[in-house]
Image (spheres, coloured by chain):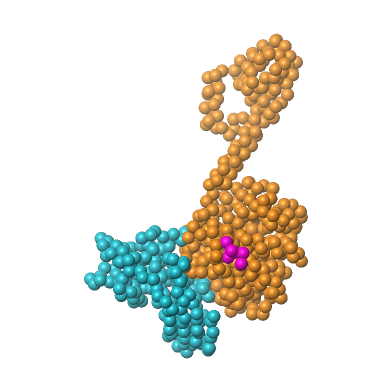
Amino acid sequence: MKILLVFAALMAAARSEQLFVGDQVLRITASNEDQIALLRALGEQTELQVDFWRDPTTPGHPADLRVPFSSLQAVKIFLESNSISYSIMIEDVQELLDEEKRTMMKSRRLERSTSTFDFASYHTIDEIYDWMDTLVDGHPSLVSKIQIGQSYENRPLYVLKFSTGGSNRPAIWLDTGIHSREWITQATGIWTANKIAKEYGQDPSITAILDSMDIFFEIVTNPDGFAFTHSSNRMWRKTRSINAGSLCVGVDPNRNWDAGFGGSGSSSNPCSETYHGPYAHSEREVKAIVDFILGHGNVKSVISIHSYSQMLLYPYGYKTAPAPDHQELNELAKKAVSDLAAVYGTKYTYGSIVDTIYKADGTTVDWAYDNGVKYSFTFELRDTGRYGFLLPSSQIIPTSTETWPALLDIMVHVLEHPY
Amino acid sequence: DIGDVGLKYHLELVLEDILDNDSTVNCSAEVLYHPGNKNLPPDVQLTIDGELKNTDEADNIFYNRIKSLEKELVAENIPDSHGNMSPEMEPIHLLAWAASGYVIWQNSTENTNFQLAQIKHVKQVKREDEYLEFDYMILLHEMVSQEIIPWQMTVLWHPQHGVQVTQ
């Protein structure tokens, strides 16, 4: 019997997946010594290949018997014809094994991630996508991952949804990495998403926000561009869409929105870094967000995160006329910037896009604002040019840490000023 | 405070030593752009109110280190994709920064805002005289157009004689 078990185990090692499909574990209770003897004899029948997980000892004490699928009928008939009572403890051993494997892998992944994910370094797209799954696994009742579309090169466009329930609650949209070379933004996005998940139930502000509102966070908004910054050109900004009739690739996703589209604050030259594209929303990466926000219908704030320059900006970029809510947005920006500076002394300037940085047509926040999203802001994170896009990874956590109170200020204001 | 009269700008600015945040110097400058002739760089008059820190010691250490290299220095991607650079490359980077300042000045208009984005490649060129010579291929980032512009510059440097750029 032992030799057979060893042989079976070796077979199992070779083809472990199929070995226990349909096998059951029976809990058998012998009511007298004769039945105990019968059970022992059953175990000796090598062709049945049963094995006791708990041996029959004395009457009244249950014995547990694993029965291979092929022997099930024979064993049950034997038990019933001898009036030995039994019940089915495990309906399908393989199913249980598979579930256990899944749970083990999940917790291994969790262990790997929560203790070993390095927030202080820059990651590849695969690492970020893997980390998203671990975040969801670690906070299953708060965070879920949705796919809002596909990039030009067919990469999934993932959005993390933070929600404590309700149905189509008023929502805040956050995005990072729309310009792929701005690596500090995706890195800050990861840290911030993790922070939101961690602080729900701890920090009163984020708890209040998530108790009434949802947060949607797209961390890798331009995955094709991001992959390209890793594989080929660290300074790539645009999407990777092919432009008809041109050797130059890509459209500036922050000039492709339908707000002042095609104006002088963008370029009509496909080779330009600010090429607006053939028409508004031509880029799948942009269209996916447009469709999501319009389809949702209840987005109250759009915060789009860029680098570098250390600025907090609000509409408009496409015209000099002040936005109707200019005063309120300006006050809020002023507060946010002040709270950011309080952390490490990092100075930000703030104001409308056109006044503070330059004329820019077809931007995310101008589109959002013109489509009823009042609290639309763009951040330009560190630094002011010393490292520019190549911000040392040692600055990821300080940058994320100082930006957090500014983001909270905006989100709290949105919560407290429903419209 | 920046006041402008036509194309002449008056600037009050504060220089901060990047290697020592607490060390600052007040300056004022007059910048005159020439709208007619785009090829003329702006005129700049700078007045420094105080003194710049003495860097003789660090300069000489760097100078002697390079002079004593057996093979000409060659390096790439400073800083790298993650924003990191080795301590040995820091002076090479600072030198490029100073030299690119000249290039940027020569190519600036009222509608440009250049920054040094990265050194793609640097190669030391052997010289008979006391100067150090480096051939740099740099990337400049122009903020308004968002373009990345590669630029080749040859830089001469000596601790006592300072930086010279021959494009």
Left or right position of A370 against A307: right
- Range of residues picked out in magenta: A338-343
Residue occupying image coordinates x 74% and y 19%: A85
Which chain wears orange? Answer: A
Quarter of the image containing the C terminus of chain B?
bottom left
Residue occupying image coordinates x 59% and y 18%: A46
Quarter of the image containing the N terminus of chain B?
bottom right
Task: Report which quarter residue A86 is drawn in.
Answer: top right
Left or right position of B5 against A99: left
The one of A328 and B59 positioned closer to us in this rendering: B59
The one of A271 and B38 positioned closer to us in this rendering: B38
Is B120 located above or below residue B111 in the figure? above
Q: Position of residue B54 (x, y in %)?
A: 36, 70
Left or right position of A192 against A229: right
Residue occupying image coordinates x 73% and y 54%: A211
Residue A251 is covered by the magenta coloring: no
Image colour for chain B is cyan
Residue occupying image coordinates x 73% and y 24%: A87
Task: Report which quarter residue A27 is drawn in.
Answer: top right
Is B45 located above or below residue A275 in the figure? below
Q: Position of residue B51 (x, y in %)?
A: 40, 75
Q: Position of residue A135 (x, y in %)?
A: 61, 49
